[in-house]
Image (cartoon, helix red, strand yellow):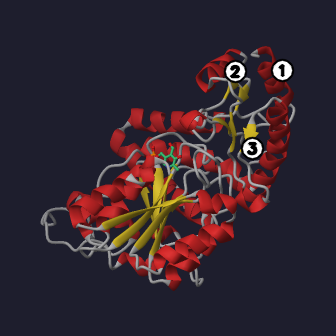
Amino acid sequence: VSDVPDPFEGLEVAPGDRALYPELDDVYLGWAAIAPASTLVRRQVETFLADYARGGLGGFGRWLSQRSRLKERAAAFIGAEAADLAFCQSTTAGIIAVARSIAWQKGDRVIVFEGEFPANVTPWQRVAADFELELVTLPLAPFFRSHEEGVAALRAELAEGARLVAISAVQFQSGLRMPVEAIARACHGAGAELFVDAIQALGIVPVDVGRGSDAPIDYLATGGHKWLCGLEGAGFVYVAPERVAALEPRMAGWLSHEGALDFLLAGPGHLRYDRPIRQSADFLEPGAQSHVGLAALEAGLAPLAALGPAAIHAHVQAIHDDYEAAFTERGFRSLRTAGPAGRSGILSFECPGGVDPIALQRGLREHGVVVAIPDGLVRVAPHWPNERAEVERVASALDSLR
Ligand SMILES: Cc1ncc(COP(=O)(O)O)c(C=O)c1O
């Protein structure tokens, strides 16, 4: 039951309908970087600010229930329970929170991948240095050749012993979708835990943490400002319920205790410092959060929940088909996998000889087309409000830039 009414109940949206994005750039293909704000996000943030303008403390109280509702919705997105989630500021913050909370033993091996977004490498490097762990970096190339080959290479490394594998569900640069379930099975078969950076997957590629299955994801983190259509500053981290008790409370703060708010709400005599740290994922919410960001995140999720990730994925794949044809006809090399299992919301291309990606990005921008260029690839990342009709526009922009 919410003090802030649910403005998204019965929301109806259709793939390709830009009505919620009236001011958006002509052809916006930058969802894998930063989501534009929909009218739902704007309205929800304005409502939030109006509440806080009337009274900060009153606003805080009214929006508490909105956050419980959001946690349930976010959990449903990944097949988890609300109690398994903690809100966090960003993917990075979630990764750091987990990495620093694991009860490491000196010499534990942690496997990361060459080519990953650095957010999923730096925190593991730091804990490796601080806890004297061995960091092993594997190439992603075998996964590119086939999921089976990638998993086999990982299994071979796991046979040497590993405490944890950290991987993104979708690779930020190539868009390669990883076989997360098979990776989880390989990890668990070898006694290793699995951490998943899900920011390039959630909202566009179905992800399930496999709670209760033989191949569960142990930890997952995401920001909300890409495919989940929220704003920067709010995301969430998942901890499998069977892993929580073993975590060390190194990241605990004043809000991590049992009855943390009692001294503020329950009259005199409750100010104490010896309350136990909660044994639930939300001990990773140590202090005040970006509640305005969480308000925006709920508005971002609403259309995604209404459409469902499978339908969004299918819609985007049809758009990718057309972009792939348009770019390859013009000499670009597509990095899209032959089989559908490796495909995501990201479609990336290598530029033909003589084409400078920075100049190309700028030129496209002048034609109203927004793409990203991670490490020199041209990254095309449409989402549910995009449509196939836009491809023609991009193709003629490419032609006029020759
Ligand atoms: C795979 C991946 N992880 C993490 C991030 C960013 O992390 P954060 O949410 O901490 O900015 C990105 C992109 O910005 C990404 O592509």
Q: Earlier in the sequence, mark 3 or mark 2?
A: 2
Mark 3 neighbour density, 10 Å: few (under 14) some (14–19) many (20 or more): many
Residue 158, above or below 175 = below
User: Which comes before the other along the chain, label 1 or label 2?
Assistant: 2
Report whether residue 57 is seen. yes
Left or right: 20 as drawn, with respect to 178:
right
Which residue position is annotated with label 3? 384
Do the residues bearing badges 3 and 1 touch, measured as CB atoms within 8 Å?
no
Give the labeled residue for mark 1.
396
Q: In the rendered image, which quarter is residue 31 located in?
A: top right
Q: Where is residue 291 in the image (x, y as percent from the top left)?
A: 42, 46
Q: Residue at x 53, y 47 (%)?
A: 224
Amino acid at the residue labelled 2? Leu
Residue designated by label 2 = 364
**Residue 8 coordinates in the image, percent (x, y):** 67, 49
The residue at label 2 has a CB less than 8 Å from ligand 1: no
Q: Position of residue 334 (x, y in %)?
A: 74, 42
Q: In which quarter of the image is residue 181?
A: bottom right
Q: Distance between the residues labelled 3 and 2?
A: 21 Å
The vertical placement of 250 against 162, above or below, is above
User: Which residue corresponds to the image point at 66% horizontal and 22% vertical from the top-left?
Assistant: 360
Q: Does the residue labelled 3 lie within 8 Å of ligand 1?
A: no
The disc placed on residue 277 is none
Circle 3 or circle 1, nearest the eye: 1
Q: Residue 134 location in percent, x, y? A: 32, 67
Circle 1: element type:
helix
Q: Is mark 1 within 8 Å of ligand 1?
A: no
Say what secondary structure mark 2 lies in.
Answer: helix
| Lateral position of residue 268 relative to residue 177, left or right | left
Q: Badge 1, how many Cα within 10 Å: few under 14, some, many 20+?
A: few
The quarter of the image holding the C terminus is: top right
